[in-house]
Amino acid sequence: MRAGDALPPLEIGITRTLVVAGAIASRDYQDVHHDTEAARQKGSPDIFMNILTTNGLVGRYITDHFGPGAVLRGVAIRLGAPNHPGDTMVLTGVVEDVRDDTATVRIVGANSLGKHVTGTVTVTMRNQGGRS
């Protein structure tokens, strides 16, 4: 792993089930994440994904790439365009910095409306002994 290395893109289909299940799993019972009519009354065309689900998907993207020895040390993300059911989010990443066994990866998750999530993830690779 070197600075400038690009991670392969990951396409994630945004389904109604993913949006609702992510909200429930993270105990986010805001109606805009499960009730289409309530979301519309609040100005959204449909329900939309919560930040905790996005955070989990970003973490999955990094750990899937770096493997079972990866330990997330920091995730700093910012939301932009909402993820609505029926859309696709494509996660991409570029390694910005590598120091010893720790890398900082800049990530972007884009959908048809624009950038859903941007930010950085700091990941450490566990050493051979299983300790970090």
Image (cartoon, rainbow, N blue to C red):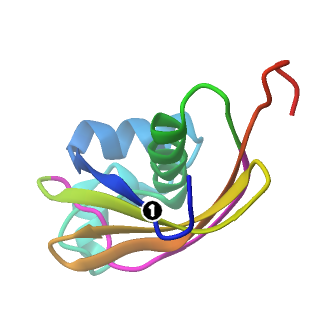
Residue 19 pos. (x, y %): 34, 46
Residue 63 covered by magenta stretch: no
Question: In the figure, is residue 111 to the left or right of 101?
Answer: left
Residue 30 pos. (x, y %): 49, 56
Q: Is residue 44 above or below residue 130?
A: below
View extreme (top): residue: 129
Residue 27 pos. (x, y %): 59, 41
Residue 79 pos. (x, y %): 47, 74
Is residue 83 visible in the rendered image? The answer is: yes
Residue plotted at (26% across, 75% down): 44
Q: Is residue 67 above or below residue 45?
A: above
Is residue 48 visible in the rendered image? The answer is: no
Please tell me which residue lies in front, 93 or 52: 93
- The image quarter containing residue 80 is bottom left
What residue is pinned by disc 1?
5
Residue plotted at (31% across, 63% down): 38
Callout 1 environment at 10 Å: few (<14), some (14 to 19), or many (20+)?
few
Residue plotted at (55% across, 46% down): 59
Question: In the figure, is residue 16 to the left or right of 106?
Answer: left
Residue range of the region highlighted in magenta in the rendering: 72-85
Q: How many marks?
A: 1
- The image quarter containing residue 76 is bottom right
Element under disc 1: loop
Question: In the figure, is residue 9 to the left or right of 54?
Answer: left
Q: Quadrant of the C terminus?
A: top right
The three-letter amino acid code for the residue at tag 1 is: Asp
Q: Is residue 43 above or below residue 89?
A: below
